[in-house]
Amino acid sequence: DKELSSELRHVARAEVVETERKYVQNLQTIVDVFMNPVKMWAKMTAGQPDSITAEEIDGIFGGIPALLELNRTMLTALQDAYEQALDLGPVFMSFASSLKLYADYVSTYEKRGALLESLDDRPHIVSFLLACEMQTTCKGTS
């Protein structure tokens, strides 16, 4: 029974680390496939009627780079704890104050959604975002 309990904890810890790894990968995809290309496209089309402003980009993607950095650091700590067969709880506790970044991000969720919907009136932006989404590295992250 103790052996089974130990095995179940090991499986659960592995799942936590794998889920965090996938989450970091998805955040990185958002940055690489959407945010950075949109920023470059915005610079190239600045002043044109269908362009997107820096403020709109920040309104959509603001906070994601900080979340990526936080979760990348936390993933490293989780992997280290997992490899050393340590409990993962203390890792999460050490990041508790940093996880407050999510409160800020989540509090603007509706505003982000409304901003994205407002872009539907600009066909060039819609086409550009669809082209970004079609990249193989996106893997359906949008």
Image (spheres, helix red, strand yellow):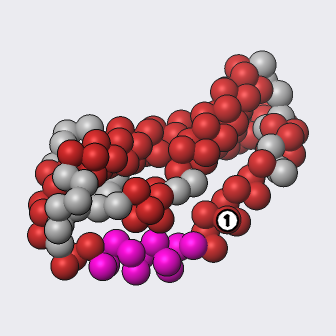
What secondary structure characterizes most of the magenta part? helix
114 magenta-colored: yes
Q: Which residue is mark 1?
A: 104
Of 3 and 44, nearer the camera is 44
Is 2 situated above or below 57? above
Q: Hey, which quadrant is residue 48 in on the image?
A: bottom left
Is 106 situated above or below 22? below
Amino acid type of disc 1? Asp
Q: Which residues are magenta?
A: 108-118
76 magenta-colored: no
x, y percent for residue 44 = 21, 45
In the rendered structure, the answer to whether residue 28 lies left or right of residue 4 reads left
Quarter of the image containing the N terminus?
top right
x, y percent for residue 47 = 23, 59
Residue at (74, 53) in percent of width and height: 99
Using the rendered image of the protein, determine whether residue 60 is visible from the camera's viewpoint. Answer: no
Residue at (77, 26) in percent of width and height: 81
x, y percent for residue 76 = 66, 27
Using the rendered image of the protein, determine whether residue 128 is visible from the camera's viewpoint. Answer: yes
x, y percent for residue 87 = 83, 35
